[in-house]
Image (cartoon, coloured by chain):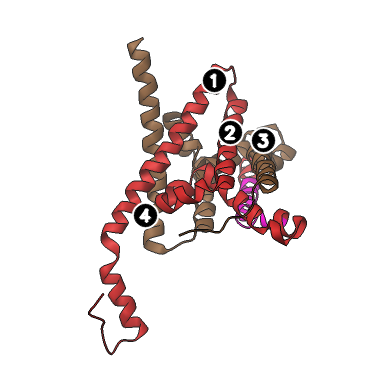
Amino acid sequence: MTAKPRENSNQNYLNYVKTQDPPTKHLNNCVSAFLVGGFICSIGQFIRYLLEYAGLSGDELAGATSIILIFLGCLLTGLGVYDRIGRYAGAGSIVPITGFANSVTSPAIEFKTEGWIYGMAAKMFTVAGAIIVFGVFSGVIVGLVYMFV
Amino acid sequence: MQAELLQILLTYLKAFAVGGGICLLAQIIINFTDLTAGKILVYFMLAGVVLTATGVYQPLVEFAGAGATVPISGFGYLLANGAMKGAEKGFFYAVTGSLAAASAGVTAAVVFAFLMALIFKSRTKRS
C-alpha cells in the first residue's frame, strides 16, 4: 500500500483493490461455508437420531428437529455467538434453518429500543417476512396446481 | 453391530456432504453476485418449493436426511410437501396445507425470538 496510484479516481482505486483482493478469499469462503454448513446439518442429523430414539416419528420428528435447531439458532444469536460464526462461515451459517432463526432474533433484539410493537415485533419479520410471503404464496400455487392438474 | 455403526456414520457423512454442498452453492452465488443474505434465503426457499413440486427434492431428502431438510430449501420442501398432501384431501387443505406444515418452524422462531428479546440486550457489533 506504500505505492499509491497518483492521478487516480475512485474507479482506479476500486480496480486496484479488485486486483489485490479476491482469489484466496473466494476459496476460503467456500471451504468454510461447506464445513460449517455441513457441520450444522450433522448436528441436525444427531438431533434427529436422539428424537427418534425418544420415540418420535414422521411429521412430529421433523417438526421437533427444526424447533430444537431454531431454538439453538435463537439462543446463539442472543449470546452474540452466531454473528461471530457468520463472519467466518458466510453462507454456511445463513442457509441452514439456524440462519432463519438468526434473521428473526437479530432484529428483534436490536430494535427492542424502538418499542415492543413497532420495534421488536414489527422488525422481527424484516427478512423472515419475505420468506413467509413467498413461501405461502408459492405453497398455495403448488397446492392448487396439484388439486386441479 | 459394526455394520450398524458404519451405517450411522454413513448417514452423518451424507448429511454433511449434501448440507455442506447446498451452503457451498449459496456461497459461490454470493461470491459472484453480491446477493444479500435475505435474497439468498428467499431464492433457496423457492428453489426448495419448485424442486419438491417437480419431484426432485424428495429423493434427496431420502438420501441425505437432515442434509436436505436443515438448509432453508428444506423449509420450501416442507411448504410444498404440505400443499401436495393437502391437495389430496380437498380444496381447503390444498390452500392451507403449506403454512400448516411450516407452522412448527414459524411458531418456534417467533416464540424463541421474543424470549431472546426479553432476555438479551443489543450489543455493539465488533468487526
Q: Are marks 3 and 1 on the same chain?
A: no
Place residue B11 in its image quadrant: top left
Q: Quadrant of the N terminus of chain A?
A: bottom left
Q: CA distance from mark 2 to mark 3?
A: 26 Å
Chain drawn in red = A
| Above or below, comparing residue A28 to residue B8 in the picture | below
Say which of marks 3 and 1 sits in front: 1
Residue type of the residue flagged with mark 1? Glu
Residue type of the residue flagged with mark 3? Gly
Residue type of the residue flagged with mark 2? Ile
Mark 2 chain:
A
| Left or right side of A36 for A105 | right
N-terminal of the pair, mark 2 or mark 1, is: 1
Chain drawn in brown = B
Q: Start and end of the magenta stretch?
A: A122-141
Tell me the SS state at disc 4.
helix
N-terminal of the pair, mark 3 or mark 4, is: 4
Q: Which residue is mark 1?
A: A52
